[in-house]
Image (cartoon, helix red, strand yellow):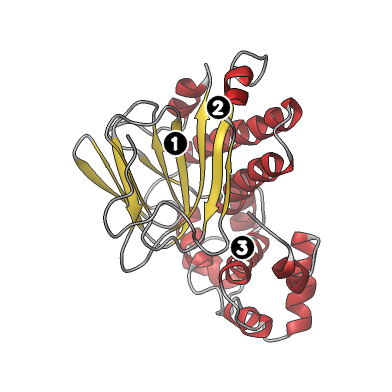
Amino acid sequence: MERSGKGYRREGFAGQRLRVVPRSIVAGALAAPVTSQLLVTDCGHFPHAEGHRRTRPHGAGQAVVIVCSQGVGWAEIDGVRHVVGQRRALVVPKRVAHAYGAAADDPWTIWWLHLDGAAVAELLAATGATRQNPVIPVTSLARCTALISEAVDYLERDETPSSLRAASGAAWHLLATLGDQREGWAADDPIERVLESLATDLGRPLAIADLAAEVSLSTSHLTALFKARTGYPPMQYRTLLRMQRARELLDTSDRPIASIAREVGYDDLGHFSRRFTSVHQVSPRAYRNTGKG
């Protein structure tokens, strides 16, 4: 049984994306090569998910992976409550009773997957998440949310075996990325501190020299370490964070594009539009007018 609870809602968030593979197709895919090992059965994106909650007293039929990109959520497993903050992932194994939801004062924005298949347990274990400690850091947020978005894209296209395999590939890459991040993360890690700075107040000016001074590294050394961890130079990573936030605002508000541009650090609307287009291959206005979900 799955409950949303009084005062909560299951879905219906502005700008959401949500795909659920029909269970008849799931059954066939779990008997097929590739997808028998890892299959995305459900996936989506819930921006500013106010009132979001799930309660599953007997667990889900699949493992659940949730990446929080903004705001705060919570989870309860085995009677223990965990905070799920920005740039954290919640990993819940199959058939484990749980509940989770958005914080009332700062609702989370989440990207999520439900996963099934013979390799799922081993892949989840590689992330470092456990039943006792189900919340893990996400240092490569842009990469991880892009991989979940990629899975959603494939399943929005259709539910053919090729799309199911492609979504599985994105999910496999996601879990491998989460595991790789865990191995290099520590609370006093200078790269983690830089990631925090990059994600804080996306509208403020910030230079690579400021970041390097903050963690007592040269700009070249910081750039090399940061790129090894995330796959991007620091300022390019910040651009991806800004574009991600801009995309969420375009999806969830009717604010003027110039206002959104200023919030994410671009006083020049033309510069913002060019940057957004280079990342998304579509202009901000065209993106807003594109049907989603």
Q: Which mark is residue 64?
A: 1
Tell me which residue sits at (76%, 28%) in the image.
162
* 41 vs 207, nearest the viewer: 41
* Residue located 55% across and 47% down the image: 44
Q: Separation of disc 3 and disc 1 at Cα? A: 23 Å
Q: Position of residue 289 (x, y in %)?
A: 73, 69
Residue 132 figure quarter: top left
Residue 19 appears left or right of 127: right
Residue 163: x and y in percent read 73, 33
Counting residues from the N terminus, which is met first, the one under dot 3 or under dot 1? Answer: 1
As rendered, which of 118 and 13 lies closer to the eye?
A: 13
| Residue matched to label 3 | 244
Q: Are marks 1 and 2 in contact (CB under 8 Å)?
A: no
Percent coordinates x, y for residue 210 in the rendering:
55, 72
Choose mark 2 or mark 3, whichever is in front: 2
As shown in the figure, which amino acid type bears the numbered disc 1? Answer: Val
Identified at 64% across, 44% down, the residue is 152
- Residue 201, how many percent across, how many down? 50, 74
Q: On residue 23, which mark appears?
A: 2
Point out the tag, 1 or 2, that comes first from the N-terminus.
Answer: 2
Q: What residue is rendered at 47% in x and 62% in y?
A: 215
Q: Quadrant of the C terminus?
A: bottom right
Give the Cα separation between the discs numbered 2 and 3.
32 Å
C-alpha span from label 1 to label 2: 17 Å
Label 3, secondary structure: give it.
Answer: helix
Tell me if 13 is positioned left or right of 224 in this view: left
Does residue 234 sit above or below 117 in this rendering? Answer: below
Quadrant location of the N terminus in the rendered image:
top left
